Image (cartoon, helix red, strand yellow):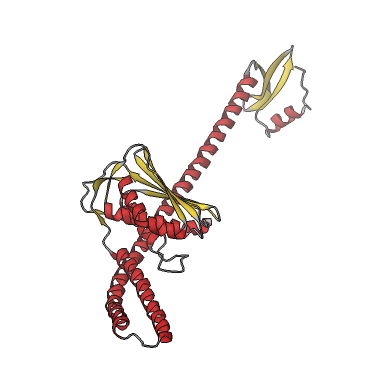
Amino acid sequence: PEAWGNDHPLVVKIINGTRPMESRKVTFGGKSLLEIVAPFHLNEKIAGIVRLGLERGNTDQILAENRRNMFIFLAFVVLIALLSMWLLYHNQNRHLAGIVEMERQLEKAERLSSLGQLAAGVAHEIRNPLNAISMASQRLKREFLPADQEKMTEFEAMTGVIRDEIRRLNGIIEEFLTFSKSRRLELHDCTVQEILQKIVNLISAEAVTKGITLRTDWGSDPVVIPMDMDKLQQAFLNFIKNAMESISGEGTVTISVRKPVDGRVSIRITDTGCGMTSEEVDRIFNPEYTTKEKGLGLGLPLAHEIIRGHGGEIRVLSLKESGTTFEVLLPAERHSNGKGVKSE
């Protein structure tokens, strides 16, 4: 390298003590050097300056790789930190959602319990005077017929109204009592097609009267699963009657059974009725919600409780003005001893 005089900036800094050592990159003889400059002391005085040139070789490459590795490491640490924060946030939200769902289920169970107790009490209180009214109306028709034909027509119309209203109130009471009954299940192996065929036989006359066609697709083989036959029959009757009530005028209700897949049998009830919006689908199993003009609308909530008690699942596919499909998935194998299984 070139010679330095006393006025060289580095020499001045070193002599003045402001820079005890200096290093810089230089090129000499076609080689890349690292030059280190330091003062040389003699008798505690600066006697001169030492200039040391070290061949750098691949030092730059090593430093660049180290910087790159450090950057990658820092990026990895930041990524791990962000991922950990996201997992913590996700798990916290899931835990919170679970707590909210548990609180909602507990609140629902308390409401159902209170509603069941109220239903039983109200039903028993109403049934006695209702029976008395029914017997009185029957006696009126037998023993107090008016002689005047014009009055006879009005008399029959009025007593008919009484009978119809008594029948309607009895239906409401039955809904109350059914909803308030114990949810305990007695499981026995029964054929799914058998209970569905019983329901079809039971409601076929009503369907013909309303202009509704009942279609069945039982599959090739009987499907036997553990069930409480009476309660499950009540649940499917509610689904099918709900399908029929959704049809205004002529229409079709199709009931099909599919063999177990993934350990569950599929029963579908499809109608060509008015269908539902997504908001209505979300609320149909709420006992406090109904779109019916008659009755309390407890049929679907009751069916939902029965299916859940069997360890099953209900899927609903519906479009407004395009009909509805209820798919009930039930376990094909028994998961308990079949005695005293309590519905949730």
Residue 139 percent across, percent down from the top left: 28, 82
User: Left of 26 or right of it: where is 190?
Assistant: left
Residue 9's place in the image compared with 204, above or below, is above
Q: Residue at x 34, y 46 (%)?
A: 330
* Res. 218 image quadrant: top left
Residue at 26 percent of width and 45 percent of height: 190
Q: Residue at x 60, y 27 (%)?
A: 68
Spot occupied by residue 41 in the image (x, y as percentages of width and height): 63, 24
Residue situated in front as seen by the camera: 326 or 5:
326
Task: Please give left or right for residue 202 compared with residue 316 in the image.
Answer: left
Q: Is residue 162 left or right of residue 76?
A: left
- Report the label total: 0
Regarding residue 203, the answer to whether it shows in the image is: yes
The one of 267 and 37 positioned closer to us in this rendering? 267
- Taking the view exactly as shown, the residue that stands out farthest to the top is 29
Horizontal side of residue 312 vs 89, given as left or right: left
Whether residue 103 is visible here, answered yes or no, is: no
Residue at (66, 25) in percent of width and height: 39
Q: Quadrant of the N terminus?
A: top right
Nearer to me, 256 or 122 = 256
Picture coordinates of residue 122 (x, y %)? 31, 75
Task: Quarter of the image for the C terminus: give it.
Answer: bottom left
Q: Is residue 202 above or below residue 37?
A: below
Residue 107, image x and y in percent? Answer: 37, 63
**Residue 88 vs residue 336, the one in the foreground:** 336
